[in-house]
Amino acid sequence: MRILLMVAPSRGALTLESSNDIAQNMGFYPPLGILYVGTYLKNNSQHEVEIVDSESERLSYRDIEEKIQNYQPDVLGITTFTNTLRNILDVLKITEKVCPNCITVLGGPHIPLFPCETVEFAEVDYAINGDGEYAFKKLLDVLEKKLPKDMLEDELKKIEGIVFQTSGGKFYSNGYARVKDIDSLPFPDRSFLKKELYFCILGKKRLMTTIMSSRGCPFQCTFCNTPDKLYRYRSPQNVVDEMEYVTKMGIEEVFFFDDLFNITAERAIAVCDEILKRKINVKWAFRGRVTGITEEFLKMAKKAGCERIQYGIEKATDASLKKVKKSSTVRDIINAVNLTKKYGMMCVGNFLLFTPGEGEQEAEEIIKFSLKLKLDHAEFSVFIPYPGTQIYEEGLKTGFFNKDYWAEYVRNPEPNFQLLWEEKVSKERMYYINNRAHKRFYFRPRIIWNELKRISSWEELKRVLKGAFIVWTLK
């Protein structure tokens, strides 16, 4: 069969952040989810597979229509985020028009939150809840048999993670699909994509890519809606094998995109040790936890080519960190940042403003804390009560939200949907304070001078100027 995997465009998608939020301009990263699925199909089946990343290619709906019309897929698979649901429905309507016999399958982070609501849409045939590699191939194997409807449904129900509407009008959802041994998966085949389209605004190299060294998260942060709490990690050898693989493609920088690259210092040290043993010449960065930082690890990381660490700091006091179940302390934060700078690596901090109970005073504490830390970059975000978060569920139970706004939205995704935690501060004021936080952080002599000193190429200069312009124009 002909399989088309797609990332829908995000232009016009739901955005609850301020319209010029700096986080929206940090770069384009390869869509690893569909890359893994497409690569697994390519290596383990006879299906013809093509991947379209509408976002990085900046495709219009007319472009998408032409691609679907020309390719005529038997099955269309789309990565689904709650905020791009309207866009995805638009793509499905196009598909129905130009390729009416195409079977549609949705996967991605939206499905665990709203499995049955997803397949309520007439344009959606199936959804996959969880890891897609095995489940999607099994679905294709069943569809290829062209079984009678009753036999088809019996076979479909055997697939872990499958979600569909039965001929009797009932919704069937078979749990959450997991690949437990992620070392067994082939590396994402980046030849499916145009690698020159992907970049990080904080990176130093022209060509970069992302790698996921683990899946799942066992932590319980109240503002996060990650559904998979079973943490699985790849062996250091397997991770570094992929680093070698991408360097042979001419890629010069790797960004470890999993939240828990350094879940423990010991695991992160093992990856560094493997890089040093093989003498791989590649620069890399990671998103990390301040509690997984030791001097021994950072010393090895620097030697192994690490240039940047992005920490989820979020708050400025032990009490506020405890309230959102962050499992870190202010002392942990200061220690991690100071050690990172001691070993000459760029240090980035993420901060979250206006969680429940917080007003302007708490926001000011967080901003002042960010200015005191030895950070090179900072990203500030207004808290959004996303579905599936502990905070949103508590808001429903206590009556802070008088109805389930997200459940209504996903059944009828209107473009003007708005939902923030407006307890002590208005939406407009939150955005204003958030945007001013970026200006207060970046337009300081130390930050400007350090940015100028670091520039070593024309590409890097362009990225720095773009970043400066984005911050300057925040309102």
Image (cartoon, grey):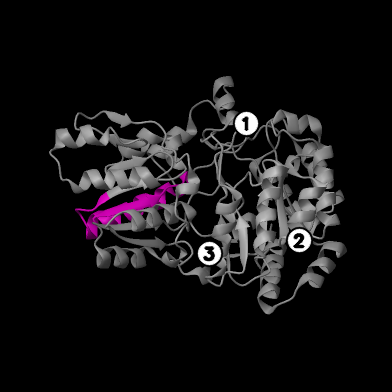
Q: Which mark is residue 220?
A: 1
Q: Nearer the viewer, mark 3 or mark 1?
A: 3
Q: Which residue is mark 3?
A: 245
> Furthest residue to the bottom?
458
Residue 194's x, y, as percent? 46, 69
Q: Which residues are magenta?
A: 74-103
> Furthest residue to the front?
277
Per the model, the C-alpha gap separating discs 3 and 2 is: 20 Å
Asked whether the residues under the numbered discs 3 and 1 touch, taking CB atoms below 8 Å apart as contact, a structural biologist would say no
Q: Amino acid at mark 1?
A: Gln
Q: Nearer the viewer, mark 2 or mark 1?
A: 2
Asked whether 1 falls inside the magenta stretch, the response is: no
Residue 17's x, y, as percent? 60, 48
Residue 124 seen from this side:
no
Q: Earlier in the sequence, mark 3 or mark 1?
A: 1
Residue 122's x, y, as percent? 26, 42
Q: Amino acid at mark 3?
A: Tyr
Per the model, the C-alpha gap separating discs 3 and 1 is: 34 Å
Q: Amino acid at mark 2?
A: Lys
Observer-nearest residue: 29 or 300? 300
Q: Circle 3: is it few (<14), some (14-19), or many (20+) Cα within 10 Å?
A: some
Asked whether the residues under the numbered discs 2 and 1 touch, taking CB atoms below 8 Å apart as contact, a structural biologist would say no
Q: Residue at x 84, y 46 (%)?
A: 368
Q: Which residue is mark 2?
A: 303
> Furthest residue to the left?
148
Asked whether 76 falls inside the magenta stretch, the response is: yes
